[in-house]
Structures are given as structure tokens and as C-alpha cells.
Image (cartoon, coloured by chain):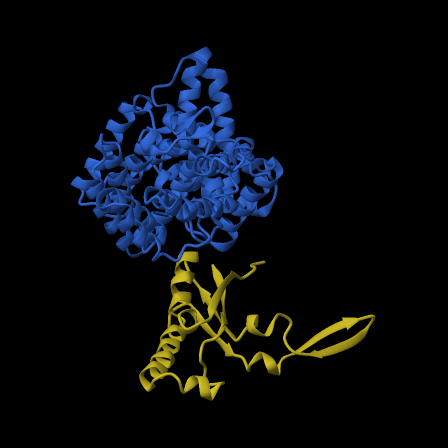
Chain colours: A yellow, B blue
Amino acid sequence: MKYMLMIHQGTTPTPLDPAAWATLSEDEQQAIYAAYNTINATPGVTPGNGLQPPETATTVRVADGKTIATDGPFVDTKESLNGYLIYDADDLDAAIELAAQIPAARLGGAIEVRPIQEW
Amino acid sequence: MVAILEQTFRDEWGSVLAALIGFLGDFDLAEEAAQDAFAIAAERWPRDGYPEHRRAWLVTTARNRAIDRVRREQTLAAKTALLQLEEKVRGEMSPTTFRDERLELVFTCCHPALAIDAQVALTLRTLGGLTTDEIARAFLVPEATMAQRLVRAKRKITAAGIPFRVPPDHLLADRLAAVLAVVYLIFNEGYSGRGALAAEALWLGGSLVEMMPEQPEAHGLLAMMLLHDSRRDARRRDGELVLLADQDRSLWDVEQIAQGRAALDRAFALGGRGPYVVQAAIASRHADDPPDWRHIAVLYAELAQLTDSPVVELNRAAAVAEVEGPEAGLRLVDELDLDDYRYLHSTRGELLHRLDRDHEALAAYGRALALTSDDAERRWFTRRISELDPTHSPQEGH
């Protein structure tokens, strides 16, 4: 089964916020990079992209044929998506185990695991 | 005759359903097929005689019905499924050697990716064989709500890929704890009044022990439930709560106490020292006459270490009060951060009363009264208040 692992950074320090990122020791920073490298190299994983912070988002709707673009993400800023990857796994347990390896899961964020619709 | 059928249904439903889910890979299809098979059994067995291998008969019959059902459906998906099924039937045709897959079933039903109320409902439905309506009534929700809960849970199992298996070793401890928690939750629902659920939990606990005889915590849970349940008839007098110390011991079920202690001994023999085992040990010491409070306090300390729970600390404080006096108990109680917990205040009230500080005791019982939503408890706290302060008119809470 294919799953999308949606990474919500929450309060996780990331390089996008240099001040927060600097609160981590060099070892911790290296460990985070290493964890993502390991995850992206895991068989079955199709790495996704990291996203710029939600403040950079634009939300688009069409009403009566008119395109309306508004500033900000669709969901609350603190709930918005920061990155994702696709994992072709045996079952949900395997997907949960991989999700638990993503640094955001232990550093103040959470990973949402969603099966991908198969047609 | 009906009794034999009912007993067979009771004993075999979970195993038959588990075997079918394992084989068919689909909860709904398995459930329908199992129901078909039991209906056919009810019709034929009294007429033609009871088969020697009832479970095998039921599984084989249900399996054939399921294949018929799939065959009738004309969709491509159904045809694909049918091919796989027929292949499997050819693969394993010895009807007496069905593997018991109830363990796979219970671990699937109690998967942490399902909401806890869904875990409870699924476990009662699949392993316990309760009908949707029975579960709905036990949990005081409309049948439609419960049906919806079951449908959604089964859909998630399929859609999210929750595996039908006993978890591998590195996941087993956590997942076993989840299974035991579901059974304990069912027991607690039953303990607070609805006796049928307590009986169901005891039955499930017995099944878990049978399926996992090497797991001390499973024995511990069963022991704890048996020991608590043994006091069922003594816990209430004329509808009012009776504290352990005031209970009529002749109403305790000695047979159940013996069974509970035997289960506890097995847990100990397996080296068990987990939370359920320790709680069972505490319940066992409570059944002594008089209770060994010193030992109970030590066990609560052990349990507090395991669970990190302030509620356990509160119980320890009550045991310490029995050994070292109310002052020592009160000191421990006042260190706890449990201000919203009614039993903290009722325990304080009792200890303050023993210290002749009835004025403060009254205030404490008042807090307990304000925090409870249970009618029997409300009456009990109200009674304590009027005993402590005769000028206080005995008014019912609401």
C-alpha cells in the first residue's frame, strides 16, 4: 500500500527559522539531516519536497468563474503542511514506524499518515 | 438443544470469524458468512445431529457461503477475489487443522490507529460476538451511532492497511498493553453498574490468557478483574455505595477470589511484575482479613513507580494512613496535584475527620460532592456531610 506521510513541523526548530535552528547543538542538527537522509534512502520511499513556511502560502478559490487568491494557508498556520514523502509499505504498522523516524515527530511536530487512493 | 447451540455460538464465534477474516481478508464478508453458517447450523444440527468438529464445520460452511456470495457478484473485483479464494481453498483443505487466528483478530481490533471507543466496540462485536444493538445498549448510545462506529472502524482497517497479524516482537509489548487496556476499559464500564459488560470482560480476559499463556500481564489483568468482581454483591447496599472496609465479607465470592489468586500466582510464576500484576496483588491483599496495609502501601509504591500516576499515589497515601496514622497519610495527599479529582477530596475529608478537624473535612467533602457526576456517589458524599455536620440539612445534590 502507498501512504503519504505529511510532515507538520509544529514547533520543531528548522533551518527556515535560523534563530530557532541555532538553539540546537551542531550534533542535533547533524542528527536531523542524517535522519532525513536515512528516511529518503529507505526502500519504498519516494522523497517529497520540503515546503517554504505557511506565511508564503497563497490560497486560491474560484467563485462564479472568478479567481480569488488570498494570503495564507488553507488551514491554520500552525496546522499547515511543511513537507511530505510517499512510502510504499507492507501495511500501516510499517508506515507508522517510518513516520516515527521523522525528526519532526519527536521535536514538537507530528506526522499524518494517509493511505493514497488507488484507482 | 438451544442451550448447546448458544454455547457453541459463544465459544466458537470469535474463532470462526477470525479464521474467516484471515482467509477472506474482509471483515464484512467474513461477518456475513459467519452469520450464514451459524444460521445453517441452527437449522441442521438439531435435525441431523451435531458434527464432531464444530468449528471446522462452521468455518468450512461459512467459507463456501462466502465463495457463493462473491461468485454471485458480477464485478471484476469480485472475480479477482474469487480466483484468489479458490486458490487458497485448494491450498488448505484439511478441515481439522484450522489455526486459531483470534489473536490476530484481537490485535487488529485493538490497533492504536483506531479510536479507543471503536477498539472497544470491534472487540465486543468480533471476539465477544455481541450484536451491535447489545453493544449500543451497554454503552448507552443509539444503535445507529454504534453501527456507524463499527462501519467506520472496519472501513479504516481496510483502507489504511491495518495488518491482520500478531505484532512482531519489537511492537508486541506496546500492542499487548493496548489490548489489555481495551478489556480493562470494558470491565470498568461494567464495574460501574452494567454487569453484563463486566462478565464480558472477564470472558475476554479468560480468552486472552488462553491465547497468550506466556504473558504475565494477561494473567495479571484476569486476576485483577476476578478479584474486583468478587466484591460486586458487597459494593452496594440498597443501591448505596459501601466502602471496602464496611463491606459484608460474607457477600464476597470466595470462588472468584480463589480463581483470581490462582491467576495471580501464574502471573508471578511467569516473572510478572507489571502494572496489572501489581494491581491484582493489591486486590488480593485487600481480600485478606484484616488487610495487610503495610504490604499494600509497598505495592502501591511499586505501582506508582510503574505508572507515574498521582491517582496511585493517592491510594498509597490512604494505605500509609492505615499503617502510620491519618497525619502521615494527609501529608502525602497534600503533596498531590489532583485538585479536580473527587476522590482526592473525599480521602482528605476522611483523614481530616480522623484528625478531629471536621470543619476542614466538611469543606473537603463539599469539594468532592461538587466534582462528582455519579448519583450514588453524590448521595454518599451528601450523607458524609450530614454525618459530620448535623446542622447541615441532608439535601440531595440536584
- Residue A52: give x, y in percent of width and height: 55, 82
- Residue shown at the point (29%, 44%) measured from the top left: B276
Q: Is residue B327 above or below residue B51?
A: below
Q: Is residue A6 above or below residue A94?
A: below
Q: Is residue B245 left or right of residue B45?
A: left
Displayed quadrant of residue B91 = top left
Instruction: Check the image and name the residue furthest to the front.
Output: B391
- Residue shown at the point (30%, 54%) measured from the top left: B331
Q: How many marks?
A: 0
- Residue shown at the point (31%, 32%) measured from the top left: B245
The answer, for residue B110, to whether it is visible in the render is: no
- Residue B18: give x, y in percent of width and height: 41, 37
Q: Which one is in front, B366 or B270? A: B366
Q: Which one is in front, B262 or B359? A: B359
- Residue B164: give x, y in percent of width and height: 40, 47
Q: Which one is in front, B251 or B123? A: B251
Displayed quadrant of residue B56 = top left
